[in-house]
Image (cartoon, rainbow, N blue to C red):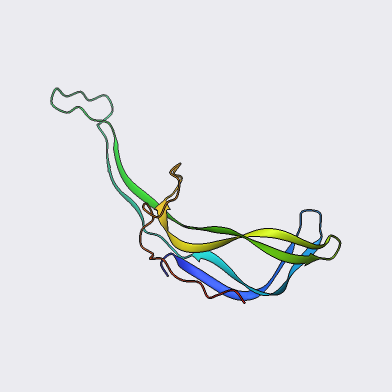
């Protein structure tokens, strides 16, 4: 399935780095970006080693593109109850848009450079 926004309503449970177990007080909407993006490893051309030509001046060519599924959203605060730490507030990333960007890119993800997946609305939080 192409890159898309996935949302599910469930009770959040996670372990902290010190082994505490925390849970949301109620079921909440969790979102993620999932699916595939188009990848291409195509045309490769290079000059023959040691060959010189007055008319051919080129570097190697490699036509490739790798797409990674990622997204945009906002940080939201969520109250959780932890076995040892008690009630506390954490921040969760709520994805609102998903799409494909070039892999291993230093490019910052923006709505303008994501392709293939339109914005989708999440179900309201209970």
Instruction: Residue 39: give x, y in percent of width and height.
Output: 37, 55
Rendered position, 26 above or below 106: below
- The residue located at (39%, 55%) in the rendering is 114
Comparing 7 with 81, the one in front is: 81
Number of on-image labels = 0
- Screen quadrant of the N terminus: bottom left
Query: Which of the 4 image quarters holds residue 89?
Result: bottom right
Rendered position, 8 above or below 62: below
Instruction: Residue 94: give x, y in percent of width and height.
Output: 56, 63
- Screen quadrant of the C terminus: bottom right
Q: Is residue 77 left or right of residue 109?
A: right
Query: Which of the 4 image quarters holds residue 36?
Result: bottom left
Report the residue that reaches farthest toward the left. Answer: 55
- The residue located at (48%, 67%) in the rendering is 5
Rendered position, 84 above or below 64: below
Instruction: Residue 20: give x, y in percent of width and height.
Output: 81, 60
Instruction: Residue 18: give x, y in percent of width and height.
Output: 81, 54
- The residue located at (13%, 26%) in the rendering is 55
Report the residue that reaches farthest toward the right. Answer: 84
Q: Is residue 125 left or right of residue 22?
A: left
Q: Is residue 112 left or right of residue 20?
A: left
Query: Which of the 4 image quarters holds residue 97?
Result: bottom left
- The residue located at (74%, 66%) in the rendering is 80
């Amino acid at each position: 399935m192409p890159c898309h926004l996935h949302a599910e309503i469930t009770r959040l449970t996670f372990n902290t780095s010190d082994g505490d177990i925390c849970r949301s007080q109620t079921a909440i909407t969790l979102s993620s970006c999932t699916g595939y993006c188009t990848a291409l490893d195509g045309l490769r051309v290079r000059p023959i080693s040691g060959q010189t030509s007055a008319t051919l001046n080129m570097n190697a060519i490699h036509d490739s593109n790798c797409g990674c599924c990622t997204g945009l959203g906002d940080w939201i605060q969520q109250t959780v109850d932890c076995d040892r730490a008690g009630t506390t507030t954490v921040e969760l990333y709520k994805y609102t848009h998903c799409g494909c960007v070039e892999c291993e890119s230093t490019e910052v993800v923006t709505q303008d450079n994501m392709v293939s997946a339109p914005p989708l609305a999440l179900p309201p939080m209970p």
